[in-house]
Amino acid sequence: MKKVIIGGGQGFWGDSNDAAVHMVKHGGLDYMACDYLAELTLSIMARQKLRNPQAGYARDFLGLLNECITDAQDKGVRILSNAGGMNIEACVKEIGSIFRSKGLSGRKIGYVLGDDMTGEIDRMIAEGITFDNIDGVGDFNEIKDKIVNANVYYGHEPIIECLSGDADVIVTGRATDSTLFLSPLMYELGIKEDDWTNIARGIMTGHLLECGGQGAGGNFDYGWRDVPDMDNLGFPIAEFSMNDLIITKAPNCGGLITEQSCKEQLLYEIHNPASYVTPDAIADISKATLTQVGKDRVAVGGIQGKKRTDTLKLSIGYHAGYKVSTMLSFAWPDAYEKAQKAADILMKKMKRKNLKAEDIRIDYIGLNSLHLGVANMDPSHVKDLNEVVLRVAIRTKDKHEAEKIIPEVAPLQLNGPPGASFFGGRAKVQEVIGLWPTLIPRDSVKLTSNIITIE
Amino acid sequence: MAEIYLNQIAHGRSGDKGDTSNVCIFARKPEYYEVIKREVTVQKVHEHFGDMVQGEIVRYEIPSLLGFNFVMKHALGGGATLSLRLDSLGKSMGSAFMRMKINFDEAQEN
């Protein structure tokens, strides 16, 4: 029975390249897929492209290819990535330069255009699309004129076209994370367009791999102390056939593949486990099974699929104001009480300066900035804290309102309660981008597959 | 019956989609599954989080994985960059969940 071996080389934009380079060399891979896009990434890339027309994609992918493309070509490992972000053609151009610099002529780069629908909104409004928020909140008219980007999540078809055209590297924009993995499986094994269960198996293969190290012992709640060699953490690899799906990892690297590590990733960012909606199929993992079948080998079973929906998700990023967060540290004795006093001073100052804020948040790092309302606030614990960092964050409509707090923090070292220490330099105001997820008809999206050959 | 932290019999992970947080939790041993099912109800989760979670909470059961998935709306202070929380993506919602106190007595459960 033919099987395809595919690895997950990146978990996010900013991930380490080490595991990807290792798995290309030693993982016995047919394919490696690298996910760079989280919910907000494309909005950030849209802003980068606005400042620099050559930017707006995950440049990190170029660094990774520079490290591994020669090995990948030697071993016949084809690489897929959504690193193209908001500037796919600029990314492809740079990849071409890398191929040429390595002497890899005649190779092919495939890429998919058409997911960026920022310029199509007016047309779609004219066609009667209402852009209702999936979460049932808000009024689209209020964000319509503040749109930063609008990208549609799409599935396997245009990627399979690139694979059929013998592309060695395939670059996309907002292809779903999981379809980067599913597409080569469908292509290699001839999985049919309406074979919903096998498509769902491919989707969940992608889901188990698309977060990189988090699928192989990273962020592992069950037993993080027992994860071997986390300094050399391997990323997960799948062996997929029509009968079996095994999750494993490359030899001679750290991390682990156990039932527990796979469980924690299988349900990560899933809502209803019986209905995980993707452009390719609806996956049902409510009866999924995970079985340890060897060291660092787990068999995945019980996944079922249902027919895909007639709509695709369009994720719209919109300008939603500004925010800034500032910090100041305090030490024992009475660290918390001193930090509270400093917060009180800052808030009174802001009132005097007539701050107009949409939201203000005061937290105490070391005490309750992560667990908030469920943190241990027992007076005896709080009283004896060694140190606490005051964090004040504000969100405003206008940039200059957010700027008001910035110069007021460092002076508290001399003008506030004793022992305050300012660090990290003056805070910077950040733009806030809100997300507006909506559904649009499949037929309103036109994707194109392209292939260039390196001269 | 003794009161223990949930993390003594369960493990899990949290993630985000917009302002929605999901926390999946799994029994550390098969016999703990029914304990979690009995103790970690939607109502108890609401009481545990209080104002931190402002929207609806749904619990899904996945017995084949000895697991549950809790999906909590309006749980991240606005989500993504709108949120002013230090942990705007809710990476620590899982451990905050695990702080829940539950009734459990190893001897009685077995």
Image: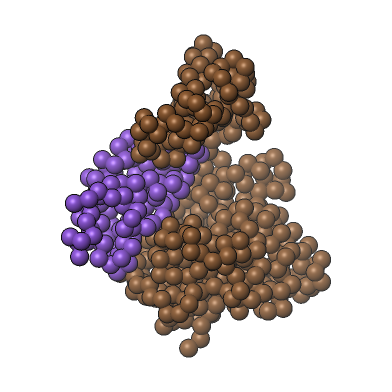
Q: Is residue A184 above or below residue A319?
A: below
Q: How is the image coloured?
A: by chain
Q: Position of residue A286 (x, y in %)?
A: 31, 65
Say which residue appears at 38% left-offset and 72% top-offset.
A290
Q: Is residue A434 above or below residue A277?
A: above
Q: Farthest residue in the top direction?
A: A352
Q: Position of residue A425 (x, y in %)?
A: 66, 30
Q: Is residue A62 above or below residue A5?
A: above
Q: Position of residue A237 (x, y in %)?
A: 53, 72
Q: Position of residue A193 (x, y in %)?
A: 44, 74
Image side of residue B2 versus residue A157, left or right: left
Give me the chain that's brown.
A
In this view, the residue in front, A363 or A210, is A363
Residue A336 appearing in the image? yes
Q: In which quadrant is the C terminus of chain A drawn?
A: bottom right
Q: Is residue A304 above or below residue A412?
A: below
Palette colour of chain B:
purple
